[in-house]
Amino acid sequence: MKTHIYSLVFITAFLTLGNQSCRKSKALFTTDDSIAGLASPVLMHETETMVYLDDYFDDPVDFDSITGAAGLKIDQNKDKRTLTLTEDGTLAPVSVLSFFSGKTKWDIPLYKTRKKKVPFSFNPGKKTYKTVQIKGDMNAWNPSATALQFENGVYKTDFYVVPGQYGYLLLLDGKEAQDPGNPKKIDNGMGKFNSLLEVPGVPGDRIPSLEVARYEGNELIFEAKQANDLIVLWNNYRIDAVKKGTSFSVTIPEYAEKHDRSFIRAWAYNELAGTTYVKIPLEKRKPLMDPAKLTRQDKAANIMYFVFVDRFHNGNTANDKKINDPEIHPKANYLGGDLDGVIQKIKDGYFEKMGINNIWLSPIVTNPEKAYGLYDVKGIRSKFSAYHGYWPTSFTKVNPHFGDSLKLKELIDLAHSKNMNVVLDFVAHHVHETHPVYVANKDKGWTTDLYLPDGTLNTEKWDEHRLTTWFDVFLPTLNLEKPEITEMLSDSAMFWLKNYDFDGFRHDATKHIPEIFWRTLTKKVKAYEKETGKSYLQLGETYGTPELISSYIGSGMLDGQFDFNVYDAISTAVTQEQIGFENVVRRLQQSQEYYGTNHIMGNMSGNQDRTRIMALATGEVKPEEDSKYAGWSRSIQLRNETGFKKVGLIHAINMTIPGIPVVYYGDEIGLTGGNDPDNRRMMYFDQWNTMEQALADDVGLTAKLRKSKMSLLYGNLNFLLAEKDVLVYLRKYFDDFAVILINNSNKTREVSVNLPLNNPSQNLKNLKKQTFSMKGQTLKVKLPAHSFEIIYN
């Protein structure tokens, strides 16, 4: 399905700088689609903000004028491809940038920065240190990013951060330490605690709220509390919003009737704060109410399953070939999974039974046929094969361990026939040292330097040198700041879309790759979307702060990333008795603030670089221990009833919060293990026990409910209760709603909440058949230990 983004041709049009209230003008729409997709908001910085027009506009546009709200200064740079924005402090929290060319106009949302100056100080008292540094959420855990000034016996600096909570540690003579002068702590998600810096924001009773209440004919009615005004866009054009008390009415443009799919986005704001946007998909000139009409081109409807190809299913023993090296432990060698195995499971209906409609394949290009790397800890020693696929020796050749090009095409065609997408895990950061590109160009500056100026190895410098670090001495980092290398590699990525009809990418190591590559690739992807009429999903992988993660998301960049911060909060709250759901709420609210309510971030059940969630849920692996060593040094096998129930809670939460649910292979039956490679055991499909089957059934049950409820796909998220062991939240889209209730305690709980709904008692259903009652606005549900329920209409 091709979505055109139409702009407005004015017959009479006036935009007054600083006046963004209701406007009246005769207008008609044209088929100009110079902006591909929905223009993502521009986020202002505390000083100057650079806007790359190529992120938004497909081709150079000669603008007659560019205007904005009062308090905004716009300078178009000499190259005419960038803008520099500054503001005087009076800019509204949410506004629009308007672009005029001839009779055509486009509107792009603009967010005022929420950052504030926060002083920080550390008093060492009588102790002396040669070096004092700080690392934390406020500087992306990079101590070299913040200079501390020593004045009058105190170390000082200023941070510019948005309101919220920030974990941090001090580095005292190079050793990590909590701040002795700060008693506040926050869980780090790995069994330990960091010091906590709290930055207050706008009082809760002054923050505006927004929801779409109903529609009448072609009018949408929004309820906005504590709001002075409403900004509404149909695709990339601002339309009028008429205020009536706390309500705003919006007329869907007549031209929307010509479209199978377009979108309304709305923001409410006052002088202090703005909301994240409400996003409403339209079917012609009506809000889309039937989720069955969503297609696999609707990115918000994706439910993803990560197929670790070598460890998923062996469908063809003829291509089984281990790397013949006695230094490779069997668990670090090829185990036989292949493309035939994936094909068989598609044919068996395995993914359909679970409600999966997007298969993410681990890298399938050729890799070295020898042993590399070394694990050598406490007498345990092993080298590794490249069974995982992340050491590419080609950009375009299919790994014969997994199959060939014909088999790959068969897999993708079959998935498409079942209405499923297939995305490819693409490695752009590095190549293996035997890759022909490196061999031919290693002396031509095609890679970053292996050694730093002080002579130390530039390996695994994840934060200090994140754009140049090598992941290992045999994995050269490509110098993608060079346009010719970025052009070559982005063309290689497009090869997979054009020759195999992949539906997008999961991008490995996103934060370690310069922005020029993402902008170049995304521009090519957008051009190909116009050519094919399809949409392509791009999800990144970044460990870091929401600010760092969000810097790679938006027009010209990626659609979303995997949300490790939310994953850590959920997994910790569910598996660690001393941690409650309060941090889950904080992280989910933070994600809404940075990525929007209707974001498409990936919400994972697990990850190939983390301890299996089952091992944490049973307590067999402790969060504070070296989980890689645990996987190498002992047999981790415990899987009990409590463990299965806790893993089920994580799936239930992921399936019901905003974003794309992602099932890590094996988590649907509770595979266990330590960290890499123990978390990559072979999947199995036969002789499941009753607990495995029950967990898999629950995954399918919640996934299918998600696909059937617009509230779970596009609804607002409101938290009704958050305690140590109990979490209750509401998803709502017009009159469609779902109430999700989680009990993580070891005893039965009767949970009672008031629902902020009109007539909530009509036609209620309970997914898990738990006992419930509804009287007036009060919902009561009896939840057994470590269980969940979803009450919906």
Image: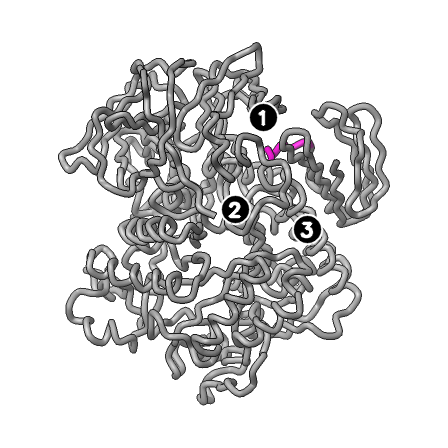
N-terminal of the pair, mark 1 or mark 2, is 1
> x, y percentage for residue 27?
37, 21
Whether residue 117 appears in this view of the structure is no
Q: Is residue 760 left or right of residue 374?
A: right
Q: Nearer the viewer, mark 1 or mark 2?
A: 2
**Distance from label 1 to label 3 (Cα)?**
25 Å
Which residue does the image show at 20% across and 33% down from the upper left?
Answer: 62
Which residue does the image show at 57% across and 60% down from the upper left?
Answer: 305
**Distance from label 2 to label 3 (Cα)?**
16 Å
Marker disc for residue 211: 1
| Coloring applied to the structure | one colour
N-terminal of the pair, mark 2 or mark 3, is 2
Range of the magenta residues? 715-720
Q: Secondary structure at mark 1?
A: strand
Q: Is residue 89 above or below residue 297?
A: above
Q: Secondary structure at mark 3?
A: helix
Kind of residue at badge 1 = Glu
- Judged by its main secondary structure, the magenta piece is strand
> x, y percentage for residue 556?
33, 44
Kind of residue at badge 2 = Asp
> x, y percentage for residue 75?
20, 27
Which residue does the image show at 29% across and 61% down from the upper left?
Answer: 491
Marker disc for residue 298: 2
Q: Is residue 595 left or right of residue 640?
A: left
Marker disc for residue 704: 3
Quadrant position of residue 773: top right
